[in-house]
Every structure is written in structure tokens, then in C-alpha cells.
Amino acid sequence: MSADLQQKAHDHLWMHFTRQSTMDRTGVPIIVRGEGHHIWDDTGKQYIDGLAGLFVVNAGHGRKRLAEAAAKQAEQLAFFPLWSYAHPAAIELADRLAGYAPGDLNRVFFTSGGGEAVETAFKLAKHYWKLQGKPTKHKVISRSIAYHGTTQGALAITGIPAMKAMFEPVTPGGFRVPNTNIYRAAEMGAPTDPEPFGVWAADRIEEMIQFEGPETVAAVFLEPVQNSGGCFPPPPGYFQRVREICDRYDVLLVSDEVICAFGRIGHMFACDAYGYVPDIITCAKGITSGYSPLGAAIVSDRIYEPFAHGDLSFPHGYTFGGHPVSAAVALENLNIFEEEKLNERVRENSPLFRAELETLLDLPLVGDVRGDGYFFGIELVKDKTTRETFDDDESERLLRGFLSGALYEAGLYCRADDRGDPVIQLAPPLTIGPAEFREITGILRGVLKEAESVL
């Protein structure tokens, strides 16, 4: 079976963000089962899922009640669109999400996933400002190295040059400001104390709005904790300052919570963790814990208001947005969150997770441990004293040449990435606790010690 699957994969499967040539040399890891925070490959070997699939399986693998919710809904109504019609699961889920969302974010536009949610927010922002008689407000601001999706529109917001190079020209109007990587603040010419750094980073948004002209800027897209680059949390006061800036210049604030929502930071929506109310929240991934695809843009009453009258519509949609099976799974997934108090669990255990990972700071390769909730990045450096990073060849040898394979071989599935400086990222299911933190850290320590000999 395994050889047969490998051959079929080699001959026909085009994987995402993957060097297809690796299948010629090593084949592809084939994952066949999941239970709790563990996954198993086709040889029967067990691994810790240290990335919750892809920041997705927040409630853990093997939840039979989620599979049963999907089956029950599929038997009753497998599919119907939200194009001029509705169905109970989408209505109930919209009500539930509006109840969790802060402020006046009461309207839910469903999509199939996170990139589509960002695309929706981008288009909605432009449409909204045209309705307000401000048709020149079409530009969007995001942060350096930030990932907001790969569709042609969302790619304009993504701040990773290598992801755009092959697809230029992308949708126009995307502009970049510095991110909140305080470990590299000195390199940005920024203060290295958290609060002044937060003001400095937020003020770069104001500077960009002024430079481009407030009359041309539609929205600012920010993740509560920036994923790409390795888990950059916001400094104290950062989002409060950003909110003030957006209000001053009449710019929408979009909280891109595709990763951070649904418990990853210990709240249903991470904007609550950092005390700000955006105009739009984009979300996906953990909304169903990955048991069925779903995303959403949750929109404030102010943005929705002009669409509530007359013959106006928002000419945008997706066949599978708000799919009945996905919506039913999401409702049951949220029941699990409430019954098992997963958000509270993350808030209680996050300091223990951080403390465990910080024990790795005694290793020569480990420069920084950062993040929040159950979402952490470990930055690897060439020189701890100077914070010198690796050049491209060294990074290639370290990450793809050794760490990715060695961590997996040692029984830990996680991400070794260099979109930005080299990092190891961890975002496990929210069901784990101190014993698993120690197990993960033990594997990391052993592999990182071995890695020293590779360079």
C-alpha cells in the first residue's frame, strides 16, 4: 500500500508550497490517522502534532462528535448555497459568531477558508468607501513579512516578496510597514523597550497613511500575533494606538485572525486579548478545528449599514461559503470549546508553555522565544551576542537540509521556516498541557543540539 501510494503521489499529486522534486529522493510523508495531539504515518509511526495540522486542529484529532455532526447534517441537507437562500446551520452559526465578536461586529459573511475571508474583506472595504462617496480609498496597508493569503487580491496584502515575484503584477494598492519583531527593533532603528517600540511601530502606519494620502487608504490589515517571521506578538498599547490612527484618518481596521481566533491566543477572538475592536475580523482554520473547510468575515454594523437598504447588494460570494456541513461542524466544535473550557485552558497554561520553551535559551542556536497563547516561535541565530542571523545557504542547510527532517524523525511535526529569519514554530492542539510541553521541549533540545554540528 505504501509503495503504491508513493507512486501515485509522485505521478499525480501537486502539493502546496512544496518542492515537488523531493518526492524523487525521499518520497512524501503520508499521514493516515490522528487522535488527540498525535498523528500516525502509513508505516505506523507516531508523532506529536506540534502545529495542529496547520494552526487548525484546535480541539484535537479524532473527535467523533464532530464527524457525527457532519454526517447528520449531510444526511439532512448536504448542500445549499447562501445566494438569496439560507439554511439553519449558517443562520445559527452567524448568530453564534456575532455573539462572540466584540463591539458591533454583528454581520457574518461566510467563505470557504482564510484566503477567501481576506479577499472578501479587501473587496468589501473598497466597495464600502465607494458607497460613502470616497471612491479613491482603495489602498491597503499591512506589515513586512506578513502572510494574508495567496489569492491574487490577498497577495497584494501579503508582505513576503518571494511569494509575489512570480505573479507580478499583483493587484495594485498594497503597502508595507514594519512589523512588531522587537527582537530586531534595533535593526529597524526603533526603541527596544516594549511600550515605546509599540508606539513607534504603530506610528509607521500613520506615516504611511500620510505619505499615500488618507483619501486613498481603505484599510489596514493586521494579525493580532503575526505568524510569518515567527510569532510576533503586539507590544503593549500597539493596537490601541493603531485604532486611534485608523479612526483619525477614516481607515478601516481589519483583524486577520485566520490563525489567532478560536483559542489560539486563549479567546474566541484574539482582538479581545489585546483590547481593541476592529471593523472586520477575518477567520477560518480553528472555526471547525479543520474537520470541514470554512471561513468568515465578521463585519461591523457601520460597514454593513449601506447594504441594508434598497436594491443594493455586495456582488461577491463563493459556492461553498457557509456550507451546511461545515457550519454544523463549527457549531459542534464551539460547543466543545465551551464545555471543555479550551480558551481558559490556554490562558492558564500559556505561561507554563513559554517557560518550558525558554529553557532552550541556553543553547547556542536559540536566540529568542516569543509568542502568546499556544502559538510560539523559536528564532535561531548564528551568534547570540550580536543576534547575527544565517545567510541563505546556511539557512537552507539548517532548515531544509537538517531540521525539518530531523524533528519529524524524532517524532515532532512542527514548522521550520525562514520567511524572515529562521524559526521553529509551534501551535499544537489546545488540549495539551504541561506534560506535553516537556515532551515537545525535550525533542527540540535533542535535535537542536545535533543541529550545531550541521553548520
Image (tube, rainbow, N blue to C red):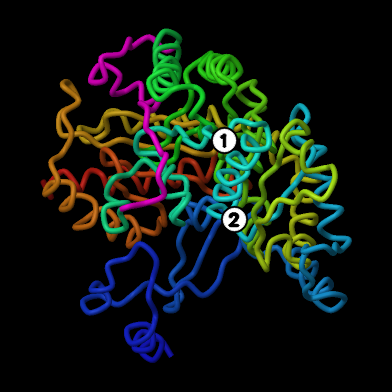
Is 337 left, or right, of 167 in this rendering?
Answer: right
Whether residue 391 is visible, yes or no, is yes
- 439 or 123: nearer the viewer: 123
Query: Residue 264: percent from the left, percent from the top?
Result: 59, 40
Residue annotated with mark 2: 57
How many C-alpha atoms fall within 10 Å of the one at disc 1: few (<14), some, or many (≥20)?
Answer: some
Q: Label 1 to label 2, Cα distance in Å?
A: 40 Å
Question: Which structural element holds mark 1?
Answer: loop
Membership of 179 in magenta stretch: yes
The magenta stretch is 169-194
For badge 1, the amino acid type reads: Pro
Query: Residue 134: percent from the left, percent from the top?
Result: 59, 30
Q: Which mark is residue 135?
A: 1
Query: Residue 32: percent from the left, percent from the top?
Result: 51, 75
**Quarter of the rendering containing residue 325:** bottom right
Membership of 181 in magenta stretch: yes
| Residue occupying image coordinates x 59% and y 19% | 243
